[in-house]
Image (tube, grey):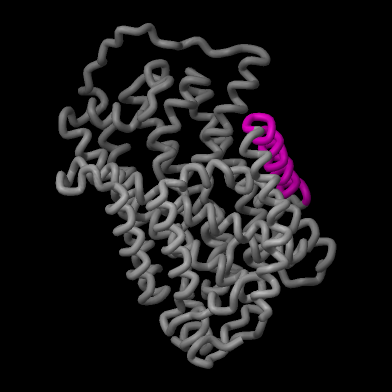
Amino acid sequence: MPDASGAPLARPDRDAGPDDRSTPSRGKLLQVLGLAFGLAVLVGNTIGMGILRTPGEVAALLPSVPLFMLVWVAGAAYALLGAMTMAELGAMRPRSGGQYTFVHHALGPFPGFVVGWTDWISTVGSGAAVAIVLGEYLGPLVPALAGRESYTAASVVIGFGLLQWGGVRIGDMTQQITSLVKAVALVVLAGVALFMSGSVDAVPTAAPLVSSVPVGLALGGAVVVALQSAIFTYDGWTGPVYFGEEVRDPGRDIPRAMIGGVVLVLAIYLVLNAAFLRVVPVAEMAGDPFVAATVASRLFGPTGDTILRALMIVSLLASVNALVLMGSRVPFALSRDGLLPAALQRVNAGGMPTVSLLAGTLLALGFIATNTFNTVLALLAFFFVASYALSFTSLFVLRRREPDTRRPFRVPLYPWIPGAALAGSLAFLVAAVLGDRTNSLWALALVALSGPVYLVMRRVGRG
C-alpha cells in the first residue's frame, strides 16, 4: 500500500537487493541498523531503576551473599532462554513490530491483535512512567522545575518524538550514545564503590539487622519471590525484535544482539551488586528501598544525592528513547496487516513511521496529563508474561508448520530451551493470577473486549 507520497511501503518478505537496503527512499523502513544498535536498545530498554532498587528486595528475602548473587545469575539464565528462543523467530521472520509479528504469523490475527495493542499501550505507558520519574529526579537539581514533573515529562516525550522524526539514523545514534553513557556511568559507580569501600566507615543502625536465611519450604518460597523480582529487572531483552526489517543482517545481528545483550546486562548487574555489597552488607541491605542511594551517600557524603540523581537522569534518558522508538513500530505493523487504520503505515524519507510515532507521543502525553500510567501498567502487567508465552508457543507452531523455512539461527537444544522458557512463562502467569486476582480478572475482561474492538479495527484497517 502506498504512503502519502505514493511510494510503496517496504515489504520484508520480498527479496531486497543490496542497493535496496540502505538507499533512503520515501515511504519505507530503511535497513540501516547494526549490532551496535541492537545492543544499545536492549541495554537502554532493560537497565533502568530496577537494578538500583531491587537489590534491597532480594536481600530481604535471601540475606546470604551466595544466594543473593545466585538469584541474579538465575534471572539472567531465564532471560537468556527467552532471548535465544525469540532470536530464532526474529532471524527467521525479520519484521519490525515486536512480538506481535510472530504471534500474528503463527497463531492468527486475533491473538496477534491482542498482543499488539496491549504491547503498544504498555510500551507507551512505560515511556510515560519513566519520563515522570526523570522529572522527579531533575526537580531538585533544577529548582525552577521542582513541582513540575508532569511538564518536564511531557517535554522529554515531545523532545524525543521530535528528535526521532528526523529518521531512524538519528534514533540509532541517540540510542547508542545514551546507552553507552548509561553503561559507562554504572560501571564507574561500581568501580568507585569497589575501590573506595575500604575507606567507608560502617554506619551504626538502631534496629537489629535481619540476617537469618529461611530454610526448607520457606527457603524455596523466598527463592521464587526473589527470582520474580530479578526477572522483572531483566525484562526488556525483546528490544531488538521491534526493528527486525531495519537491521542490515538480521539473521546474524538479531541473535547476537539479544544473546550478547543479556550477557552484557548480567555482567553489569553482577558488578554493581558486588560493589553494593562492598559498601552495604547484605543483612543491612535487606529491605532498603533504594540501595544505590545508600551507597552513594556513604561514598560521596552530601554530594551523593546529586551524583545519583545525575546518574538516574542519564539512565532514564536512554530508556525513554528506546521506548519511544519501540512504541512507534507496533501500530505500524498492525496497520500494515490491516488491523489498524492505514494512515499508521506512513513512513517519512528518514525511515520513521511518523504517524505511528505521533500516535504514541499523544498517548504518552495523555497518560502523563491524566496520571493514569501506573494504573494502566498494573492492569497490563498480566499481558507482559502472556505475550512471552504466546511468542514461545509460536516457535513450536512454526517449527511444526514450516519445517523447511530458512532459519539463520536455531535455538540450541530444541525443544528443551524453548520448552523451559514457555514453562517459566506459564508458571509466572499462574503466579500472577493467584497473586493479583483483581488485575488478572480485568486483564481477562480486556481480552473479551478485544473481540469486538478487533472486528471494528479490522474493518477500518481494510477500509
Q: Is residue 272 visible?
A: yes
Residue 408: percent from the left, percent from the top?
67, 68
Q: Is residue 350 left or right of residue 424?
A: left
Which residue is pictured at 28% across the width and 53% down the height?
151
Q: Is residue 428 left or right of residue 352?
A: right
Instruction: Say whether residue 213 is magenta.
Output: no
Residue 174: percent from the left, percent from the top?
34, 65
- Please name the predominant secondary structure of the magenta segment in the image: helix
Residue 439: percent from the left, percent from the top?
62, 38
The quarter of the displayed image where residue 420 is located: top right
Q: Is residue 253 visible?
A: no
Report the label total. 0
- Of the pair 341 and 323, the residue shown nearer to us: 341
Q: Is residue 153 left or right of residue 74?
A: left
Q: Which residues are magenta?
A: 415-436
Q: Is residue 226 left or right of residue 407?
A: left
Give above or below for 131 relative to 420: below
Which residue is pictured at 46% across the width and 11% down the height?
211
Give above or below for 74 relative to 353: above
Residue 50: percent from the left, percent from the top?
43, 39
Quadrant including the N terminus: bottom right
Which residue is pictured at 51% across the width and 89% down the height?
19
